[in-house]
Image (tube, rainbow, N blue to C red):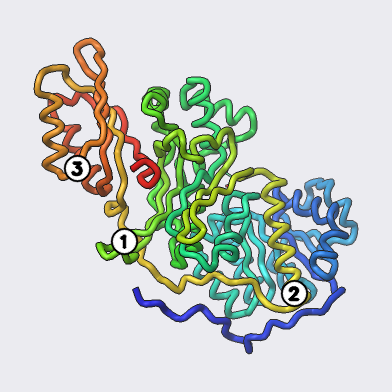
Amino acid sequence: MTSQTTHSAEGHNGNYPGKGIGQPVGVAVLGMGTVGTEVLRLISEFSSNLEQRIGGPIDVRGVAVSDLGKRREVLDLFPDIALTDNALELIDRDDIDVVVEVIGGIEYPRQCVLAALKAGKSVVTANKALIAAHADELSDAANEAGVDLYYEAAVAAAIPVVGTLRRSLAGDQIQRISGIVNGTTNYVLDAMASTGMSYDEALAEATRLGYAEADPTADVEGHDAASKAAILASMGFHSRVTYDDVHAEGITNITAEDIEAAKDAGFTIKLLAICERLFDDAGNTTSVAARVHPTLVPNEHPLASVDKSYNAVFVEAEAAGRLMFYGNGAGGAPTASAVLGDLVGAARNKIHGGRAPADNPYAHYPVADFGDVPTRYHIDMSVVDRAGVLADISRRFADAGISISAVRQEEHGDASRLIVVTHMSIERKLAAIVEELATLDDVKVVNSVIRLDADAAE
Ligand code: HSE
C-alpha cells in the first residue's frame, strides 16, 4: 500500500494565530439534552480552573435548543446567555469561537458542524453517528479552515480513547482494537449471565433502571457500537472506515442457553466491536475490517470481566503492547467530561494559536469484505442421535477445509445437543458450512452460532 500525502491545511497560510492570553473564548452550545445540560453545569462549576488551563475564560455566549419554552434550571447560572432555536444564526455570530454540538441525529448536526467549520470555528461534538458517517467531509472542512474538530465523547464517553489513538499512540502501529463500547448491551448480557434471566427480562430490567433508552433498537441491534467501531478503525488504522463499512449484529438472539453453554466452555458472551488489519502472506497489511457481533470472550481475557454498563477498549499496538481503557461509556456527566476535555483543547488553541493533530487517513487501506475476515465459530445444534452422525458432520468440516478445535455432545432424549468449536477460518467458509449443516436431515436445528474472539482465543 503506497502512502499518500498527509492532509495538509489548505485555504490559509498554515499559520494558526491565537487570540492572545487572557482573551475570552466565545462558545456556542447546540443542544440541551442530558449532555448539553451537564456541559453547561460543569463549565459554570469549573470556570476558574478552566480559565487557568486554557489561558482565558470560557464565555458561553449562546445556546441553541429546539423548544424555547422549556424551563432549564442550569441556564440560571448563565444569566446573560442568548437562548435561541436558530442554531445556524448562533454559529454565524462573530463572537463565537468554538461550537459544542450535542444535538444528536445526523443531517441537521451535519449542517451545523459544517457551517461552523467553514466559518472558522472549532467544533467539539459528541455525535458518533455524525462522525461515523461524515468524518471525511467534516475533516476536510476543518483542514480547509485550519480549525479543530474534536470528538472524544463520540466513543465510549468518558474513556479517553479517541485522543489516545490520535495523540498518545500516534507514533505506534495499532494492530487491533476490540472493545465493549455499548453500555446497554453489556448490562443486558451481564444480567443474563449473572442471574440466568432471559434477554427480554434483562432488557426490561435495564430499561427500568435507566440503562436502556425507551427505544433501545440502536443499542441492541449493534448500530451504536458500529458507529464507534468505524471511528476507532479510522483512527487506529489511519484510513477511512464509515458506519456502512461495519458489519453489525446485535444481541437480540442471544438466549439464556447460549450464555450457559458459553459458561460451561469457559467463555463470557460480550458484544464486541472488533477493528483489525488483514494481512497478505508476507505480513503486509492489505485491508482493514470493523465488525460488531456477540463474541465468546475467554474468561481470562480482561474484557470478560467488564460488567454492568461499563465499557472497555482493548488496544493492541506493535510497540506499546496490550492496553485496556475502562470506564463509563455513557451518561450525562461522563460524556460531558469528554466534551469538556475537548473544549479545553479547542479553546486553548484559540488562545495560544495552533491546531490539534487532525484526522490523518493517509494509509487509505481498503475495507475488507466481511466474508474475508478471519474468525472462529461456536456452533450449537440439535442432531439425531445415531451412529455416524458425528463422523458425517466432521467430514463436512474437513471437506470445507475447516479445522475443528473442540466437540461437545449432550444427550437429550432421542436427540443430541452437539457443540462444535472451530479453529480459525474465514467468515465466508464458516457461514457456508453452517448453511450446509442446516440442510442435513440429521441436523434438527442449528440453535446458535456465536463467534469467538479470534485473537484472544486461538
Ligand atoms: N446508548 C449508548 C450505550 C451510549 O448504551 O452505551 C451512547 O452511545
Mark 3 sits on what residue? 402
Q: Residue drawn 47% across and 70% down? A: 361
Q: Residue drawn 11% across and 35% down? A: 395
Q: Amino acid at mark 2?
A: Lys
Q: Amino acid at mark 3?
A: Ile
The answer to the question of whether label 1 and label 3 lie on touching residues, with beta carbons closer than 8 A, is no
Mark 3 near ligand 1 (CB under 8 Å)?
no
> Residue 323's x, y, as percent?
53, 51
Task: Measure how far apart labels 3 and 2 are at the Cα level.
Answer: 57 Å
Nearest to viewer (mark 3 / mark 2): 3
Q: Amino acid at mark 1?
A: Phe
326 or 6, which lies in front? 326
Mark 2 sits on what residue? 350
> Mark on residue 279?
1
Q: Earlier in the sequence, mark 1 or mark 3?
A: 1
210 or 42, which lies in front? 42
> Residue 105's x, y, as percent?
57, 54
Judged from the image, the secondary structure of the residue bearing numbered disc 2 is helix
Judged from the image, the secondary structure of the residue bearing numbered disc 1 is strand
